[in-house]
Amino acid sequence: MMAESTKRDTEPDILWDVHAVSRYLGVSDSWVYRKCRAEQLPHFFIGALLRFSPEQIRAFAENRPPKGAKILSIKKGTMPGRKGTP
């Protein structure tokens, strides 16, 4: 029979909740919520539940683009949808 720790190490990552992300990043839960509202942290919803891909959070922490994430580049002074900007 496979040891429990070995079994866990071979299973795919489970999704993280806000508290797991805040522990991993070393920030508060409210920081995680703020970054999600600002679309600065990769996340998704399952119904009303906010969830995170561990792979995408690790990529975020390493300051590299997460797999499947959209990276937007907005030049200073050009906010889409605002009057007087391109």
Image: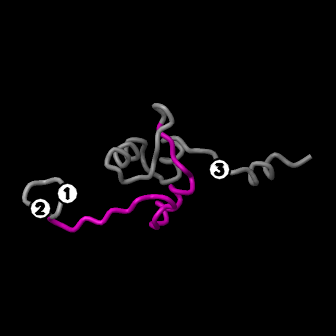
Query: Does the residue at mark 2 contact the one at mark 3 (Cβ under 8 Å)?
Result: no
Residue at coordinates 31% horizontally, 49% vertically from top-left?
A: 38
The mark closer to the camera, 3 or 1, is 1
Q: Which residue lies most toward the top here? A: 48
The residue that disc 1 covers is 80
| Rendering quarter of residue 48 | top left
Distance, label 3 to label 1, CA atoms, is 36 Å
Whether 59 is among the magenta residues is yes
The residue that disc 3 covers is 13
Residue 10, placed above or below residue 46: below
Which SS class for mark 3? loop
Which SS class for mark 1? loop
Lower sequence index among marks 2 and 1: 1
Residue at coordinates 14% horizontally, 65% vertically from top-left?
A: 77
The mark closer to the camera, 2 or 3, is 2
Lower sequence index among marks 3 and 1: 3
Q: Which residue lies most toward the right here? A: 1
Distance, label 2 to label 1, CA atoms, is 7 Å
Q: Which residue lies most toward the left here? A: 84
The color scheme shown is one colour
Report the predominant secondary structure element of the magenta stretch. loop
Give the x, y percent position of residue 4. Answer: 81, 46
Query: Does the residue at mark 2 contact the one at mark 1 (Cβ under 8 Å)?
Result: yes
Query: Which residues are drawn in magenta?
Result: 50-77
Residue type at the position of mark 2: Thr
Instruction: Please indicate whether residue 16 sits to the left or right of residue 71 in the image.
Output: right
Give the x, y percent position of residue 49. Answer: 48, 34
Lower sequence index among marks 2 and 3: 3
Residue at coordinates 88% horizontally, 49% vertically from top-left?
A: 2
Give the x, y percent position of residue 70. Answer: 40, 59
The residue that disc 2 covers is 85
